[in-house]
Amino acid sequence: MKTLFIKIGKAWSVIKRDGLINGVKRVSSAFFALFRPVGHGDVLFISGGVGDSARYRTAHVAEELENNGFRCAVTVQDNPLLNKYADKFSIFIFHRTLYTKKVAKLIGEIKKQNKTIIFETDDLVYNPKYLKHMDYYEKMNPLERKLYDNGVGGEILQDDYVKVATTTTQFLANKLKEKGKRVFIVPNKLSIEDVKNATLSLRGGTTKQSQKNMIKLGYFSGTISHNKDFVTITDVLVKIMTKYDYVELLLVGPLDVENKLVQKFGNRIKQLPYVARKKHFANIAKCDINLAPLEYNNPFCEAKSELKFFEAGIVKVPTIAVDNETYRNAIEDGIDGFVAKNSDEWIDKLSQLIENEELRQKMGQKAYQKTIEQYTTKNAKNTQYYEYLKKRL
């Protein structure tokens, strides 16, 4: 019954955030995912939902593994046939999965057969003590908040039977190692379909505003929790948009824009709702510069992956990102992007890109090359992880 209330709460939040039409579409996709055929194979991914996190951490990783000879399937924890799958796979990867009676029963069957369980996370939501750092938690409705009572999947991580965890960043890997787990970093990657959609956006001749003597900055937020991230560069954008009257700002996804920014530059700011994946890349391709700020000294932000860099890179748009461990490792500063550690650096590096079209194009091309080489499921080379999985089959 608790999970039903959680689902109702999440569905209401999605509809409230995305609007009736788009919200109902997303809720419907989650419902139909319950009945997606599973079959049998080597690795089964079980996720708590069907959003972007599940896309990257189950569907995309499954595609990567399939490209390397594994047979994979993806399902959600509310699949009515979930308990039937212990016999059909050798390895079970649980991503952001609530510890329900149904999940507990499946885990019990897996243990009886001495098969492998892997804990997977791309965030700190598995540990309730970090919720105070999660801005969005306080804004959730009471039903949705129940999802985090014990941490998402925290019971699975604490299980001594579970020896291995996978995650997205070194920061998260270090946190998981504190739990005594062997950890494999499996970076987020673009799927074959993502690359195809991005290529269509480029071939479609998306008109950039720079061709109209305007420069468009883009910020793409996944959830309302990114409000505090965006606030870190609000003053920077006020100064930039004051200095350059030909700079516009595109904001996509749920975000409360600072009043001082809207009041002063409302006619140069465009906000769009969360969009489908194909349109997402088309929107990024319309921009000249991609922004990837994060709140400082917040462990939730430190845990974030570099996906904003490569989602822009695949459509040849250069990124300026916060100077943290993850983005420093992903971006070669001044070559395929910029990292900035304070407001002065944000202003300086934004100004360089705004004033220099050749630099934008060169940096965007370099970001594209790195993305193709390192951030696609087709070109993934996580050999150590693959070898581990082969031994567990």
Image (cartoon, rainbow, N blue to C red):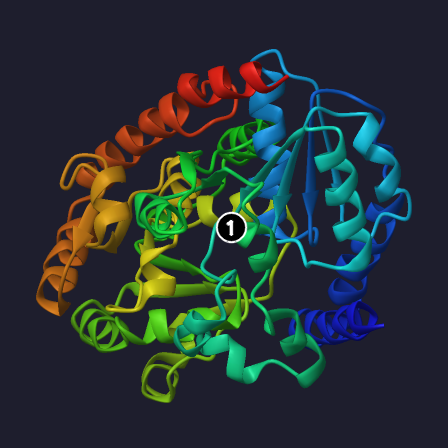
Say which residue appears at 46% left-offset and 38% top-offset.
188
Image quarter of the N terminus: bottom right
Say which residue appears at 47% left-offset and 27% top-offset.
376
Say which residue appears at 75% left-offset and 66% top-offset.
23
Q: From the top left corner, tell me how far across and down residue 83 is, in percent.
A: 86, 42
Q: Is residue 215 visible?
A: no
The part of the image, by quadrant, that contains residue 348 is bottom left
**Count of numbered circles in the view:** 1
Q: Which residue is mark 1?
A: 283
The part of the image, by quadrant, that contains residue 393 is top right
Q: Is residue 14 above or below residue 286?
A: below
Label 1 Cα crowd, 10 Å radius (few <14 / some 14-19 / many 20+): many
Residue 237 relative to residue 7: left or right: left
- Comparing 61 with 157, the one in front is 157
Residue 84 relative to residue 157: left or right: right
Q: From the top left corner, tell me how far across and down residue 161 is, in percent.
A: 58, 41
Residue 209 relative to residue 40: left or right: left
Q: Is residue 168 above or below residue 31?
A: above
Name the residue type under label 1.
Asn
The part of the image, by quadrant, that contains residue 81 is top right
Q: From the top left corner, tell me how far across and down residue 319 is, in percent.
A: 29, 47
Q: From the top left corner, tell me how far across and down residue 180 is, in percent.
A: 40, 45
Q: Secondary structure at mark 1?
A: helix
- Comparing 45 with 256, the one in front is 45
Q: Is residue 361 visible?
A: yes
Residue reaching furthest to the top: 69
Say which residue appears at 47% left-offset and 62% top-offset.
221
- Comparing 154 with 95, the one in front is 154
Q: Is residue 109 above or below residue 149?
A: above
